[in-house]
Image (cartoon, grey):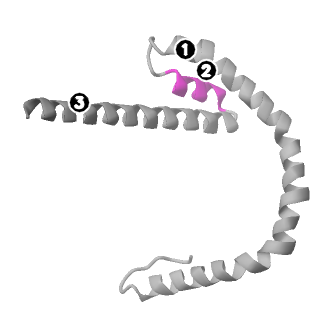
Amino acid sequence: EDQFIMKAILKYAKYAWCTWLTMKIFIKVSTYYMLKSRNMEGEAYSWITDWGPLVNPFINYIFSPISRLVIFFYHLTEPIRDIIYYEHILPIYLFHLQHLLDPPFSMAQHLYVRFLDCLPGMDFGLL
C-alpha cells in the first residue's frame, strides 16, 4: 500500500511539474510575442531570457532564429490570408450565413442580459 501511495504522489508531482512548466512556457512565449508586436524589442528580449544561464543558449541559438523565421513567413502569408478571408470567406458569411446566425446570437445575448438584470443587488454596468 505504501508503494501505491508513493507511485500516486510521484505521478501527481510529474503532472503538476509538467503543467507548471507548460503554463510558464506559454505565458513567456505569448508575452514575448505581445511585446514584440508593440515594438518593445529590449523588453521582449529581457523577458524571454530571464530563465537563467542554462536556458539562455537554447533561447539565443534555437528559439530566436526559429522565431524570426516564423515571423518572416507570417508576414509573407498575410496578404494571402487577407485575400482568402475578404474575397472568399466573408462573402459566404454575409450572404448566406448571417441571417441564420444573427437571430439566435441576438436572442441569447438578450436572455443573458435579462438574466443578469434579474439578479438582485448586482450592478454589471452596460453590457
Point out the frontmost of discs 1 and 3.
3
First along the sequence among labels 3 and 2: 3
Dividing the picture into quarters, in which one does residue 21 lie?
top left
- Which mark sits nearer the N-terminus, 1 or 3? 3
Q: Residue at x 14, y 34 (%)?
A: 4
Q: CA distance from mark 3 to mark 2?
A: 31 Å
Q: Quadrant of the C terminus?
A: bottom right
Q: CA distance from mark 1 to mark 2?
A: 6 Å
Mark 2 surroundings: few (<14), some (14-19) or many (≥20) residues within 10 A: some
Q: Secondary structure at mark 3?
A: helix
Instruction: Say what amino acid the circle numbered 2 marks.
Output: Phe
x 89%, y 58%: residue: 88
Q: Which residue is mark 2?
A: 63
Q: Is residue 60 above or below residue 13?
A: above
> Which of the two residues, 40 or 64, is positioned nearer the viewer here?
64
Amino acid residing under circle 3: Leu
Check residue 42 for magenta coloring.
yes
Name the quadrant of the N terminus.
top left
Q: Is residue 88 left or right of residue 27?
A: right
Residue beneath the point at 36% across and 86% down: 120
User: Dots 1 and 2: beta carbons under 8 Å?
Assistant: yes
Of badges 3 and 2, the one in the foreground is 3
Tell me whether circle 3 and circle 2 mark residues in contact (CB < 8 Å).
no
Q: Which residue is mark 1?
A: 58
Residue 22: x %, y % from top left: 45, 34
**Is residue 84 shown in magenta?**
no
Q: Nearer the viewer, residue 4 or 11?
A: 4
Name the residue type under label 1.
Phe
**Circle number at residue 98:** none
User: Which range of residues does the magenta coloring cover?
Assistant: 40-49
Regarding mark 2 in the picture, which secondary structure is present there?
A: helix
